[in-house]
Image (cartoon, grey):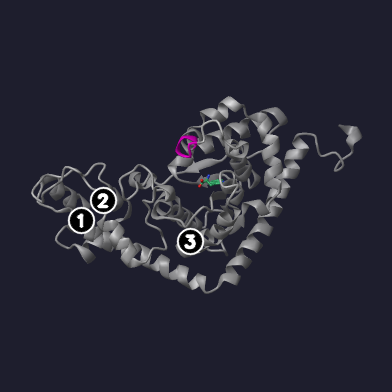
Amino acid sequence: MKQVILTGDRPTGRLHVGHYVGSLKERVALQNTGLYDEIYIMIADAQALTDNAEHPEKVRQNILQVALDYLACGIDPSKSTILIQSMIPELTELTFYYMNLVTVSRLQRNPTVKAEIQMRRFEASIPVGFFCYPISQAADITAFRATAVPVGEDQMPMLEQCREIVHKFNMTYGETLTDPQIVLPQNQACLRLPGIDGKAKMSKSLGNCIYLSDEPDVIKSKVMSMFTDPNHLRVEDPGKVEGNPVFIYLDAFCRPEHFAAFLPEYENLDALKAHYSRGGLGDVKVKRFLNEVLQAELQPIRERRKEWEQRLPDVYEILKAGSMAARQTAAKTLRDVRHAMQIDYFSDEMVNR
Ligand code: TRP
């Protein structure tokens, strides 16, 4: 079987380090293994519109920001197809057919939808489109016959819902759609990077993000303002490492060579953690180290982003060519779907069916 990756992001803002460790880094690594026959990276503008209907200009502007972040992180357009969701109208048609295979109560039970409804204070005024976005996401994944979907942990319920749709479709209309697997980062700390304020999620609306495109001084001031163990008041106090955002970030980003380069008095992260737990290690020192680590990781990304910013016509060309190529793939799946559903009226002899 062909190995196919599909994944994507909503263009509602620039991407941040949570996106990076949670999924982007993994995508680039998978891309560079050479083990995949096709890789599709989707800028999910139609999905972004499900809760930004009044702000199409915001979605439009952020398509470019997300594309720049992709290219900056090492998504290589010669290996991966970057596409804009709304340029593939076949996805909308698939969504409409899949809607018949999902109940309202099943959507209401989707934990991600539930949490987002709460966060956006939608209560009873949820746009129907927003409520149905898990179905549209199933269309995204199945249209490309994805076998692997590298995403953040928060997308797990979306994948489960997608697989249910695949099974129901195949049972009802015959084996047609491909069953996808979720690919999560191995590193626990990368699964859900907290915000710099220690809140469970890094999110633009909470204002607690470090962006991939932040300038060095901005990164530094964000790191120095990060929450740590609230009971670690004096340097001598024993500190808590678990749940401490600064250490979670170090778990996510720090590699042994960072100690040799920036903090040679410790052998590794375990040694640093042991000292912090024992007492005698101040937050400022740990934050300074984290700042060095982040600067080292983000500098090449920021520089590559700036190079692409000088080549915007090329970026648009990549999006256009990617969207056109992707449309071909989706159209083929839609043909298979229509055939399975027996609604391919004029493409075969109607009389024989
Ligand atoms: N829901 C994803 C997010 O919020 C974006 C997305 C849209 C996606 N379609 C997808 C992710 C298909 C993976 C596969 O970031």
From what the image shows, is residue 209 above or below residue 229? below
Q: Is residue 246 left or right of residue 352?
A: left
In the displayed orientation, state which residue is furthest to the right. 351
What label sits on residue 69 in the rendered view? 3
Tell me the amino acid under the disc marked 3. Asp
* Circle number at residue 226: none
Crowding at label 1, few (<14), some or many (≥20) Cα neighbours within 10 Å?
A: some
Give me the residue at 72% from left, 49% from top.
331
The residue to which callout 2 is attached is: 246
- Cα separation, mark 2 vs mark 1, equals 8 Å
Q: Check if residue 294 falls in the magenta segment.
A: no
Earlier sequence position, callout 1 versus callout 3: 3
Query: Which numbered disc, 2 or 3, marks the residue that appears first in the sequence?
Result: 3
Identify the mark at residue 286; answer none if there is no mark.
Answer: 1
Looking at the rendering, the stretch of residues picked out in magenta corresponds to: 117-121
Q: How far apart are marks 2 and 3 (CA)?
A: 24 Å
Q: Which residue is drawn at 70% across and 36% down?
A: 97
Quadrant in which the C terminus appears: top right
Image coordinates of residue 300 in percent, x first then y, are 39, 68
Instruction: State how far apart marks 1 and 3 are (Cα).
Output: 28 Å
Q: How many labels does the image show?
A: 3
Indicate the secondary structure of the residue bearing disc 2.
helix
